Image: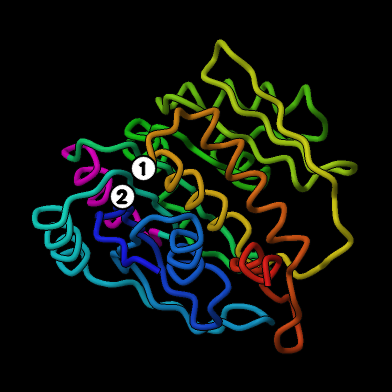
């Protein structure tokens, strides 16, 4: 088999570490590898985390985050950036400033709480997310809990998803992807730029092992954008990838296990 010498597109994740390997930068890098791009990381926080929840979290200093970002972007360059857990207002504002000076699409996953309900963003940082981070986003990917945190809109149906999208777009991202996975029925998401509406539907699988879905979806979108896809195409492909990963999610430990980032490889075996 010939060895590939071409450099793959480069995607940078700016997020926290999940010591259990199901979410955070670990999920991001696994997703990027699975989708054919070169993943790089800026670590914003360290968590002690397993299938049962988050036992501790420690954010990194602003200078450490800025130095990691500049080290990667100034030398290696990026074709897309994805943000996840940013923990504090200071980190949100620092990352937003760095992103504003980077010529690459940005996928913002406005992480507020973990799958287990543990807070991953300080309450006082929400305004910085609204006013600093979302305006530099190419795509923002809030779930319904994050929509409620950021806008106060409580979504209970698809009409509510439309209202939520309008509220998120008012903060400045080019596209909003409202993730309706917490609603009953099929897993439905709404992608819109305020004009076009794309409804993405997938079957809901009876599998509780869904840790890392949000990180995985946002990283898959960033990977598609780095590969040159437009936003609707990248989101559609990411939705298909994460749906397969949810279907193949597996048990780890005594709680909620992760989605399977390598499901396509295992399917081919």
Q: Are marks 2 and 1 in contact (CB under 8 Å)?
A: yes
Q: Return the x and y of residue 139 as percentages of the image width and height.
A: 46, 34
Q: Return the x and y of residue 26 as percentages of the image width and height.
A: 46, 72
Q: Spatial distance from mark 2 to mark 1, Cα to Cα?
A: 6 Å
Taking the spot 31% from the left edge, 38% from the top edge, the residue there is 132
**Residue positioned most to the front:** 1
Question: Does 131 lie within the magenta span?
Answer: no
Residue at the disc numbered 1: 226
Q: How many marks?
A: 2
User: Residue 213 falls in which quadrant of the image?
Assistant: bottom right
Name the side, left or right, on which 215 lies relative to 178.
left
Up the image or down, 135 lies above or below 122; here it is above
Taking the spot 31% from the left edge, 61% from the top edge, the residue there is 4
Q: Start and end of the magenta stretch? A: 86-101
Name the side, left or right, on which 77 lies relative to 1.
left
User: Residue 20 falls in which quadrant of the image?
Assistant: bottom right
Predominant SS of the magenta segment: helix
**Residue positioned most to the bottom:** 253
Q: Helix, strand or loop at disc 1?
A: helix
Q: Which badge, 2 or 1, comes first in the chain's sequence?
A: 2
For this rendering, which residue is in front, 127 or 261? 261
Q: Return the x and y of residue 214 as percentages of the image width and height.
A: 59, 54
For this rendering, which residue is in front, 103 or 230? 230
Taking the spot 67% from the left edge, 32% from the top edge, the residue there is 153
Residue at the disc numbered 2: 9
Name the side, left or right, on which 173 lies relative to 96.
right
Q: Quadrant of the C terminus?
A: bottom right
């Amino acid at each position: 088999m010939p060895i590939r010498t071409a450099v793959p597109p480069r995607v940078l994740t700016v997020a926290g570490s999940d010591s259990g390997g199901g979410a955070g930068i670990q999920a991001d890098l696994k997703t990027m590898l699975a989708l054919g791009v070169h993943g790089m990381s800026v670590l914003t926080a360290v968590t002690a985390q397993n299938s049962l929840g988050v036992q501790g979290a420690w954010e990194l200093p602003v200078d450490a985050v800025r130095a990691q970002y500049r080290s990667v972007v100034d030398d290696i360059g990026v074709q897309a950036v994805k943000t996840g857990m940013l923990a504090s207002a200071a980190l949100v504002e620092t990352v937003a400033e760095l992103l504003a000076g980077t010529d690459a699409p940005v996928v913002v996953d406005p992480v507020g709480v973990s799958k287990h309900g543990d807070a991953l963003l300080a309450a006082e940082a929400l305004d910085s997310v609204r006013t600093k981070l979302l305006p530099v986003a190419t795509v923002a990917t809030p779930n319904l809990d994050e929509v409620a945190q950021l806008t106060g809109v409580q979504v209970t149906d698809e009409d509510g998803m439309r209202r939520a999208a309008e509220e998120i777009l008012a903060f400045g991202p080019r596209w909003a992807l409202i993730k309706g996975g917490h609603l009953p029925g099929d897993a439905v998401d709404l992608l819109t730029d305020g004009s076009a509406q794309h409804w993405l539907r997938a079957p809901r699988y009876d599998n509780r092992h869904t840790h890392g879905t949000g990180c995985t979806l946002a990283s898959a979108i960033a990977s598609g954008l780095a590969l040159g896809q437009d936003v609707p195409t990248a989101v559609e492909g990411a939705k298909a990838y994460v749906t397969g990963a949810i279907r193949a999610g597996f048990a780890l430990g005594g709680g909620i296990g992760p989605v399977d980032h390598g499901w396509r490889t295992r399917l081919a075996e």
